Image (cartoon, grey):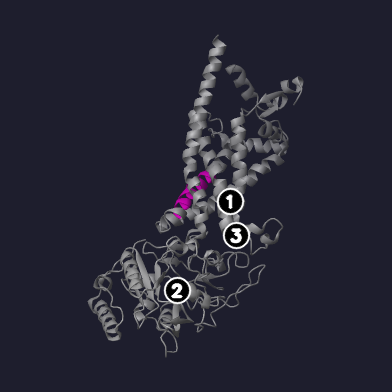
């Protein structure tokens, strides 16, 4: 991507700020998943503490601190994401009517090798996947904030509220983990792979975009 | 979770106060202030353990606090399954169900232990008896970071493990500076989930007889103490009483600062550092650790940053929107030119 000719064959798909949001949330989310697992009494029992470099995994005070550090980034970016894109009316990731049935049709093409329908900037299943990740993320964020508040200021928080928050956090953890696996598994589908470049550099090949996202290209040309 | 205060039964309450008065009067020991004996057990509570009064029930087979605790609590532990599932991969099973009589250490069936140490008091070597059980800390790590919130702090100050929710992972024991909770394998929720791979029983410790508190009754150990070495009451009054007694005997306090503050105050004529040196800590035999810090306080600063993160995200988002709109406006102006 150094020569002028290669630049001309690329098209900007994401702003730098979107890449920053995505990778900030993804990496802090991974740290949260890992430190969250270590908040269960699992590391010492399953000898993870004996793996070189993982001595700290059985220390609940250290893993809590790591969980907090990652939470600052995660929660901050989640709120930033909501405020920034909502106010700028950038809502292309939100599901649209017919996304479920269209997603099924698209999934069928992966098997039948039939041609895909023309897409906009995002595939219908991407918009559904956004919700599938957003729901556990919001569950984790809200319940995590209440649990943090309790840890510092309100150890005798109302027990019913605490149990709700605890189980929302625990179920959110499982859903987030599954959503993360699903997100990664999407890369197993060959037609999706050119999008990976966009998540690292912000750009995808123009040929790919024109072939798979013609509605997005058309929209861009209209707005020019 | 507030306590439901039953109207105090005149006969029972009256009898309690009468017996307390008789004992205190007969033994010439520090008399309880009237407002303390009459105070209802509601709101934030605290207990006072006066080591200058406790004699470890000398001459009795078992201290009264220990036997009354066993009587009040042991029948609440469910029948242990046979065989107890072997936890993978440690294969460590902790079964006290066949050793329920053990009273010389903390166990699930012995939630209070009386430690005896030698100390020099007024120039003479004497035995000091120290009843030990959960301190019911003000901000207990055992409760706040229990992954299933099976361990919670009640509004009364009591720290209570719900045996129907606990998986027996022993995290509470690991983070307790005194390693108070004790595990009984073969009981509890884990048996219904993934018994070999997750959990290993239920953790047990003193719950300050929360069920009795809800009925307006004092914990079994407090009620049974023949020396009235243990008292319970409104936190502020107990704290004031502990200070008063410590001052009166030129003694020392323990539990006020430890682990960030607790709902259990000890008063002693012997410095607690000296008593601590005499204790041989071991399994179920907690050291005193005077002045022990609340370990979770080290992460409170970062926790506060987490609570501030939504505000930081909001401000950053607004700044981002303003910047982008300004740029868009400048670009459009450029295009028009």
Q: Is residue A149 magenta?
A: yes
Chain letter of the residue beneath label 1 in the structure image: A
Element at label 1: helix
Q: Nearer the viewer, mark 1 or mark 2?
A: 2
Q: Is residue A130 magenta?
A: no
Q: Mark 2 = which residue?
A: B271
A202, above or below A57, in the image: above
B122, above or below B162, in the image: below
Q: CA distance from mark 2 to mark 3?
A: 32 Å
Give coordinates of residue B171: x percent, y percent: 55, 64
User: A146 and A218: which one is in front?
Assistant: A146
Query: Which residue sits at x=75%, y=25%?
Result: A2
Chain letter of the residue beneath label 2 in the structure image: B
- The quarter of the rendered structure image containing the C terminus of chain B is top right
Query: Which residue sits at x=54%, y=20%?
Result: B328
Q: Residue A66: which numbered mark, if any?
A: 1
User: A29 and B84: which one is in front?
Assistant: A29
Label 1 CA crowd tier, 10 Å (few <14, some 14–19, many 20+): some
Q: CA distance from mark 1 to mark 3?
A: 11 Å
Element at label 3: loop
* Magenta residue span: A135-150
User: B93 and A50: which one is in front?
Assistant: A50
Q: Mark 3 = which residue?
A: A59
Q: CA distance from mark 1 to mark 2?
A: 38 Å
Chain letter of the residue beneath label 3 in the structure image: A
Give coordinates of residue B214: x percent, y percent: 34, 69
B325, above or below A66, in the image: above
Residue farthest to the left, as pictured: B10
Q: Residue B67: which numbered mark, if any?
A: none
- As drawn, is B233 to the left or to the right of B129? left
Query: Which residue sits at x=60%, y=39%?
Result: A24
């Amino acid at each position: 991507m150094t020569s002028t000719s290669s630049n001309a064959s690329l098209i900007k798909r994401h702003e730098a700020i979107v890449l920053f949001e995505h990778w900030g949330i993804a990496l802090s989310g991974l740290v949260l998943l890992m430190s969250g697992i270590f908040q269960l009494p699992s590391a010492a029992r399953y000898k993870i503490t004996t793996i070189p470099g993982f001595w700290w995994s059985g220390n609940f005070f250290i893993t809590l601190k790591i969980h907090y550090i990652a939470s600052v980034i995660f929660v901050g970016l989640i709120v930033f994401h909501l405020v920034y894109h909502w106010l700028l009316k950038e809502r292309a990731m939100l599901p649209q009517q017919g996304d479920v049935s269209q997603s099924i049709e698209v999934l069928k093409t992966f098997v039948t090798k039939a041609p895909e329908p023309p897409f906009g900037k995002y595939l219908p299943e991407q918009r559904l996947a956004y919700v599938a990740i957003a729901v556990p993320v919001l569950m984790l964020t809200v319940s995590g904030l209440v649990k943090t508040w309790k840890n510092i200021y309100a150890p005798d928080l109302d027990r019913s509220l605490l149990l709700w928050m605890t189980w929302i956090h625990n179920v959110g953890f499982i859903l987030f983990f599954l959503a993360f696996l699903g997100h990664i598994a999407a890369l197993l589908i060959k037609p999706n792979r050119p999008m990976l470049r966009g998540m690292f550099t912000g750009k995808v090949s123009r040929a790919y975009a024109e072939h798979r996202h013609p509605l997005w290209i058309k929209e861009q040309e209209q707005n020019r | 979770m507030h306590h439901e205060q039953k109207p105090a039964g005149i006969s029972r309450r009256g009898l309690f106060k009468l017996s307390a008065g008789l004992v205190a009067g007969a033994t010439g020991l520090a008399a309880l202030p009237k407002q303390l004996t009459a105070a209802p057990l509601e709101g934030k509570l605290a207990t006072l353990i006066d080591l200058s009064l406790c004699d470890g029930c000398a001459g009795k087979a078992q201290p009264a606090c220990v036997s009354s605790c066993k009587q009040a609590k042991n029948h609440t532990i469910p029948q242990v399954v046979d065989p107890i599932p072997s936890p993978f991969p440690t294969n460590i099973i902790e079964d006290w169900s066949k050793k329920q009589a053990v009273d010389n250490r903390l166990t699930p069936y012995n939630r209070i232990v009386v430690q005896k140490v030698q100390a020099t008091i007024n120039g003479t070597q004497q035995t000091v008896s120290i009843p030990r059980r959960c301190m019911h800390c003000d901000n207990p790590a055992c409760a706040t970071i229990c992954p299933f919130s099976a361990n919670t702090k009640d509004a009364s100050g009591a720290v209570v493990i719900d045996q129907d929710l606990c998986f027996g992972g022993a995290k509470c024991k690991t983070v307790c500076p005194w390693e108070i909770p004790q595990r009984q394998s073969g009981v509890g929720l884990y048996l219904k989930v993934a018994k070999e791979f997750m959990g290993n029983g239920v953790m047990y410790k003193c719950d300050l007889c929360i069920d009795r508190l809800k009925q307006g009754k004092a914990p079994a150990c407090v009620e049974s103490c023949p020396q009235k070495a243990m008292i319970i009451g409104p936190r502020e009054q107990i704290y004031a009483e502990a200070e008063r007694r410590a001052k009166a005997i030129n003694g020392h306090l323990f539990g006020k600062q430890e682990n960030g503050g607790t709902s259990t105050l000890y008063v002693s004529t012997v410095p607690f550092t000296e008593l601590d040196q005499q204790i041989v800590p071991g399994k179920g035999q907690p050291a005193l650790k005077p002045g022990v810090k609340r370990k979770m306080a080290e992460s409170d600063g970062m926790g506060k940053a987490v609570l501030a993160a939504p505000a930081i995200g909001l401000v950053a988002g607004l700044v981002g929107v303003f910047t982008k709109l300004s740029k868009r406006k400048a670009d459009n102006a450029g295009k028009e030119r």
